Image (cartoon, rainbow, N blue to C red):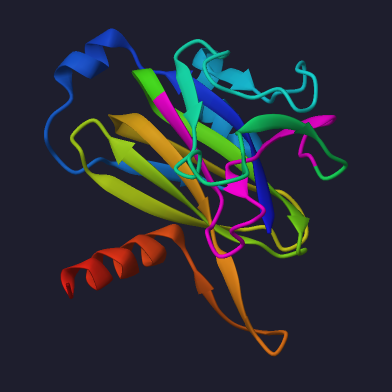
Amino acid sequence: MKRVMRWAVAPVAACALMSSAALAATVTTYTDEAAFLAALGSQAQRFNADSLASGTPLTSQVSGITFSSANAALAGAIPVQAQSSSGAATRPNLVAGGYSSGSPGIPQSIALTFSPAVTAFGAALSSLTPDSVNASLVATFQDATTRTYALKTNGKPAFLGIKSDTAITRLEQASAALVLDGGHPVGVITRSDVLGSLVHDRGQH
């Protein structure tokens, strides 16, 4: 199953970086893109990959953002890239890749590392197949804490915006792999489930 996202980010001010305290981040979430952009005001910057040729790998083309994937070393891995699709939240392109078609049990992974860090981030998850897609967005904050946000498309792009008083250094979109038994869905495996299982198995030896 392939999942894709488009991104909008706002850079954090230098004074906020220097004054951030080691306390739990106070985060406001938005499911409406217009409300999210209104909350950011003029500081919002947007990237949606529409100006790139389909198939262009994404690395560091966007100032302050590095794209990567936990699956990059897998055999046959598809790099994080711009991809044309009729399902894009804005056309023609969306951000796709970060998976290996030869490893269907390993969920897609698209990560963004911010330098400098940011105080807000918004993304729309678009489904290619199936029509309803589960995914998670994991935010890592400057104080090394993390928070996970669930996304589900229900046949149309699902928007999530987060605005924090603690700088965000990294975001990873980890889609869920659907577990089928006799062709019927019986559960969902996320990449954290897979990694947890691997750690547990190694601990038995």
**Percent x, y of residue 184:** 69, 86
**Percent x, y of residue 71:** 49, 45
Q: Quadrant of residue 145?
A: top left
Give me the residue at 78% from left, 30% from top. 93
**Percent x, y of residue 31:** 58, 48
**Closest to the observer, 96 or 148:** 96
**Percent x, y of residue 175:** 55, 55
Is residue 35 covered in magenta? no
Does residue 180 lie above or below 42 as drawn?
A: below
Mark count? 0
Q: Is residue 10 left or right of residue 31?
A: left
Q: Residue furthest left?
A: 22
Give me the residue at 18% from left, 25% from top. 20
**Closest to the observer, 83 or 102:** 102
Q: Which residues are magenta?
A: 88-113
Does residue 173 lie above or below 196 as drawn?
A: above
Q: Quadrant of the N terminus?
A: bottom right
Is residue 95 covered in magenta? yes
Give me the residue at 51% from left, 24% from top. 9
Q: Quadrant of residue 19?
A: top left
Q: Is residue 167 left or right of residue 98?
A: left
Q: Quadrant of residue 25?
A: top left
Q: Quadrant of the C terminus?
A: bottom left
Q: Residue furthest bottom?
A: 182
Does residue 163 lie above or below 174 as drawn?
A: above
